[in-house]
Amino acid sequence: MTDAGARPADAGRRPALDVSTAKARFRPGRILIALIILFVLVQIVMFLVTNKRFGWPIVGEYLFNPAVMAGLGMSLFLTVIGMVIGSVLGTLLAAGQLSDFGPVRWVCQLYVGIFRGIPPLVQLIFWYNLAYLVPRIIVGVPFGPELFSWNANDVISPLTAAIVGLSLHEAAYMSEIVRAGVLSVDPGQRDAASAMGFSRMQTFWKVILPQSMRVIIPPTGSQFISLLKGTSLVSVIAMGDLLHAVQVIYNNTYQVVPLLMVAVIWYLVVVTILTFGQRQLEKYFGRGYDRAGGKKRAAKRVMVAEGAGA
């Protein structure tokens, strides 16, 4: 028998909504913004296409010029070598800043403060003119005999100055990126590694640093792209990068804007490729941390809990 006063189990519940029948809200603000963006884009395209001063035929003529391609290769080389040296040195500086040993920590912090505070162009010019301060580079025993010596002008070439300047500048920024990534790791990981008998160095290199890559990768990718664009500064010290290559050409042809557009196109192409690679690395090192994955795991836990309570 059923109690006359009892209410059905579904009584009082709101009927389930069918999402497939839901209608999208009319958003006039979004439509207006989309129209404004479309209008601006059309104006930009029309300006680029109709303005003959851009000299698009000249751009096409010099886009794959051997001198331009050589300059592009030098820009990529400086970017890679600067990033590799800067990342290695920056990681060591980050470890030093997190050290419990005061003198090491203070020296690393002083380095970061100095090289972050000096503009990269100033650093490049300084290293290029190092021979003014040190005419000869001498290696020997302190207060003892001289072992080796070189003329500073022979050692400090534009290439050497570019590599040293870009690498040391990059190391200061990479140090802060790595340090932030290390600090993002749960302190319990250090305790667990210590309980397993790991030394401080083993804990840093084998436990902390791999887990911090999820935080390190995004700003490192942005820093890599920034370094690529920063290589254009080496043209000031007569280094044959992409910008210097187009400068040499337009100094002879007087086609300044078309040759600058050649450099712009190549910078955009390389940056687009690097951005795509950065996204892929973020996905790889972010596995298990993305929001979608978190929702799936949460839903799975709820299903398990409901099954246990049934």
Image (spheres, rainbow, N blue to C red):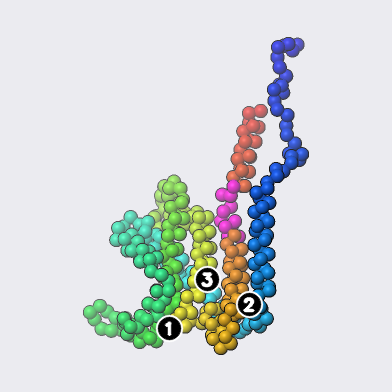
What kind of element bears circle 2? helix
Identify the residue position indicated by label 3 in the image. Answer: 228
Residue 12: percent from the left, percent from the top?
69, 22
In this view of the protein, can residue 249 be seen by the observer?
no
Identify the residue position indicated by label 2 in the image. Answer: 54
* Marks 1/3: CA–CA distance: 20 Å
The amino acid type found where label 1 is placed reads Ser
* Marks 2/1: CA–CA distance: 35 Å
Of callouts 2 and 3, which one flags the residue occurring earlier in the amino acid sequence?
2
Residue 22: percent from the left, percent from the top?
74, 39
Q: Nearer the viewer, residue 249 or 173?
A: 249
Identify the residue position indicated by label 1 in the image. Answer: 157
Residue 281 belongs to the span the image colors magenta: yes
Residue 149 belongs to the span the image colors magenta: no
Quadrant of the image containing the N terminus: top right
Q: Is residue 217 left or right of residue 123?
A: right
Q: Nearer the viewer, residue 72 or 58?
A: 58
Where is 278 relative to 24, above or below? below
Residue range of the region highlighted in magenta in the rendering? 280-291
Of callouts 1 and 3, which one flags the residue occurring earlier in the amino acid sequence?
1
Between marks 1 and 3 in the image, the one whose residue lies nearer the viewer: 3
Between marks 2 and 3 in the image, the one whose residue lies nearer the viewer: 2
Report the number of numbered marks.
3
Residue 195: percent from the left, percent from the top?
41, 47
Residue 157: percent from the left, percent from the top?
43, 83
The amino acid type found where label 2 is placed reads Phe
